Image (cartoon, rainbow, N blue to C red):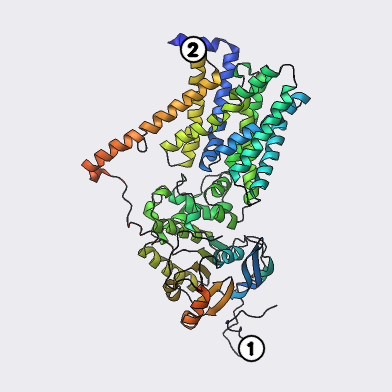
Amino acid sequence: MSDFLLDPLQHQFMQHAFAAIVLVGVICGVTGTFVTLRGLAFMGDALAHAIFPGVVIAYLLGGSFLIGALIAAVIVSLLIGAASQSGRLTNDTAIGVLFVGAFALGIALISAQRTYTRDLTSFLLGSILGVSWNDLLLTGVVGAVVLVTMLVVRRELVMVAFDRTFAQAAGLNLWVWDQLFLVLLSLAIVVSLQTVGNVLVLAMLVTPAATARLLTDHLGTTCLLASAIGAGSGVVGLYVSYHLGIASGASVVLVATVIFLLVFLFAPRTGLVTSRVARRLHFAHPERDTFAPDAPDKGMV
Amino acid sequence: MREPGVGEARPVQPSRALNTSVVSPRLETDHLSVHFGPRSALEAITTRFDPAETVSLLGPNGAGKSTLLKALAGMLPPTHGMIRLNGRRVTRPSPTVVYVPQRSGVDWTFPVSVLDVALMGRTLRQSRLMVVTRANRDAAMESLHQVGMRHLANVQIGQLSGGQQQRVFLARALLQDGEVFLLDEPFAGVDVPTQELLVSLFGRLRDAGKTIVYATHDLAQAAVSSDRVLLLDRRIVATGAPDQVMTAENLRATFGGQAIVPLTTPAGGTR
């Protein structure tokens, strides 16, 4: 058993990989909580793809991935906002049109390279075993910036997500706060790209946060649990990947998905199976019911 | 520039002889029009809302009730005309104007507690780095107590009934500590105890010199729980004391072909 756990840690590339996936799990857990609460899963997927041409251009020019990705993300999120304000197109239609277009641009640019296939694969699926010390440092610094920013503006982010009209009436500029969140989300996606890749990053954002949401009704706890589940799935997934010889990104995402399914079925109060059992018990012992809402609402007539 | 609206009493002329001071309007609109693209939502609204006054906006769906409230809150720029708050032109939301949105516009599955929502009334006055201060927490609990929700402070908001949700909104509004309270359909879909609470709360706020403006399409509610009714159908049809203004003729002019019997339509149609 100890070999199973310790063997991978002998290799430096595995140590880096473990550190990277834990960082990504934490960063994506917190940002992903807001993504799921606001129903922005599709937008998150779109940003991950839309970032692609920015990363490719930065790669071709030898510039910073981060800056290339951020520029691309901001341009695309502004275009999506503008297109969905035209009134004729829904938000998801605008997202659908623009992100695939941006993605195609990235593929077109990278296909001109001789090392096309290898480059494309590493962009799409990540290359977690190739994480360098510098990559780790960058992930850590950017992740800290994202998390500290979110902590400082948490009240505004919650207000804008929960009750937009009220937030606006209280003097918050919805557009500014939406864009700020999308920039933070883009940063989280960019630092996750190398670890899990373009295609699977959405799972790191959505799956742990969705799992956490099933377990608690408290926002702070949701963020912490999502981070823990994301980081935990990462570590377990890497072990599985190492010992079974399967792709690391896929392995991590599969572990996260299995955890989600287990929680979905067996969570203490909300699980599909457990709530059925609880209902049976409730019929047998209704006095054990802890929360009984008073004064039933008459509702709309 | 300063003509009073249709059917509105002309303000009393300033007089040194009378000790009863002339009330200057807290909020006034001057030929306010709001258009959404080619569609006109409000036309030439000229009226005033005074301190210690409760005004109900009464009209059918699409009459512009929500639009007027949002404009008064500084959330919608007027297409023509202007709004003044304490004599100063309104161009953006003001902390002294408290807005209570429709319940339907909120995601009630959100993982926040009743106390969290009440505290949003203080969001912009809280320290960025600190957790909730004792003073803010006590103030929030006191507001919740005033609306009879203190015992549910730690419950997730999705577990509440419609009336309870409305009470939480009221607690949040009270915590904002404003001069003007704008409420969009506060009576819609709430239980009788909550309706009674709303009426008594309006009374207390009015007695404390606050201005309360709320939208409704419930004629009976407007008649009993406001000092003044403003009949709205994109324009002001009439405004004044309920018993003077709510005549069959005026109501027909406001609600047109729609049934006079107030029905809560599911569509909402308020934007």
Residue A62 picture location, percent across and down: 77, 24
Residue B192 picture location, percent across and down: 36, 65
Amino acid type at image mark 1: Arg
Q: Residue A281: which quarter of the image? A: top left
- The residue sitting at 46% across, 11% down in the picture is A4
- Tell me if residue B269 comes above or below residue B6 in the rendering: above
Please give the chain letter of the residue carrying mark 2. Answer: A
* In-image side of B203 versus B87 (left or right): left
- The residue sitting at 57% across, 66% down in the picture is B64
Residue B109 picture location, percent across and down: 45, 46
Q: Where does label 2 land, which residue?
A: A244
* In-image side of B202 versus A165 (left or right): left
Whether the residues at callouts 2 and 1 have beta carbons within 8 Å, the answer is no
Q: Where does label 1 land, which residue?
A: B16
Q: How many marks?
A: 2
Q: What element does badge 2 sit on?
A: helix
Q: What element does badge 1 sit on?
A: loop
- Can residue A198 be seen? yes
Quarter occupied by the N terminus of chain A = top left
